[in-house]
Structures are given as structure tokens and as C-alpha cells.
Image (spheres, rainbow, N blue to C red):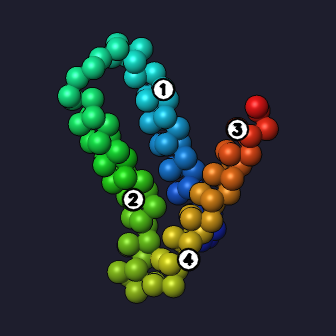
Amino acid sequence: MTINKQGFFQAIGVAIYCTLVGLFMWNAENIFGKTDTFFIPIALLTLFSTSALICALIVFYKPYKLFFDGKKKEAIDVVLSTAGFLIVFVVLLFTTIFLSK
């Protein structure tokens, strides 16, 4: 798989995962009801930490394998490609939000 293709699919994976977490957070009150408890901040911080881990795995697993197979330049290029596609996705998302108002 080409570097740009790998970066694109990794960025899509992160975007889909963030969409699912966003949908969950958007509907959390409908799922759990309105609660005011000490466990809510703990749950959100745990979700945040787990999300960071999952996104890191999506973005860095393949470059990690490439790096330790001696393909250091390709590993860095995949990370940069993924970052570039994620930046494009964020710009498109904010542009869509801005234009929809």
C-alpha cells in the first residue's frame, strides 16, 4: 500500500472513531439519564485516555512496524501523511460547521 493511501486510511479510521465517540457523548444523557455524580468526571477522563490510546494505535501501529523493520523514512512519511489528511479533515469539518450557520 502506498504511503499516502496508508495515511488516508489511518486518518479515516481516526475520523470514524472520533465520530462514534462524539455520537456516544452527544447521546450520553439519553442513554444514562441526567446524573450528577462523582463518577461522571472519572468516566469522561477514562474515555479520553482510552480514546487517546486507540487513536495512537490507529496512527502509529503501522509506522512502528515499519520503523523496526528498518524502513524509518517510510514510517515517518506515513505519520506525516496521516497528520496531513487529519488536518484536511479538520479544516473541512470546521468549514462545514461555519457554512451551516
Foreground mark, 1 or 4, reads: 1
How far apart are labels 1 and 4 at the CA level?
A: 35 Å
Q: Position of residue 96 (x, y in %)?
A: 74, 40
Q: Nearer the viewer, residue 91 or 70?
A: 91
Q: Amino acid at mark 4?
A: Asp
Marks 4 and 3, the one that precedes in the sequence: 4
Q: Nearer the viewer, residue 19 or 95?
A: 95
According to the picture, the residue beneath numbered tag 2 turns out to be 56
Marks 1 and 3, the one that precedes in the sequence: 1
Classify mark 4: residues with Cα within 10 Å, few (<14), some (14-19) or many (20+): some
Badge number at residue 97:
3
Marks 1 and 4, the one that precedes in the sequence: 1
- The vertical placement of 40 against 5, above or below, is above
Q: Amino acid at mark 1?
A: Trp
Q: Are marks 2 and 1 in contact (CB under 8 Å)?
A: no
How far apart are labels 1 and 3 at the CA level?
A: 16 Å
Q: Position of residue 35 (x, y in %)?
A: 29, 17
Marks 2 and 1, the one that precedes in the sequence: 1
Dot 1: element = helix
Badge number at residue 26:
1
According to the picture, the residue beneath numbered tag 4 turns out to be 77
Q: Is residue 1 left or right of residue 39?
A: right
Marks 3 and 2, the one that precedes in the sequence: 2
How far apart are labels 4 and 3 at the CA level?
A: 30 Å
Dot 2: element = helix
- The vertical placement of 18 against 25, above or below, is below
Q: Position of residue 44 (x, y in %)?
A: 32, 37
Badge number at residue 40:
none
Q: Residue at x 44, y 71 (%)?
A: 63
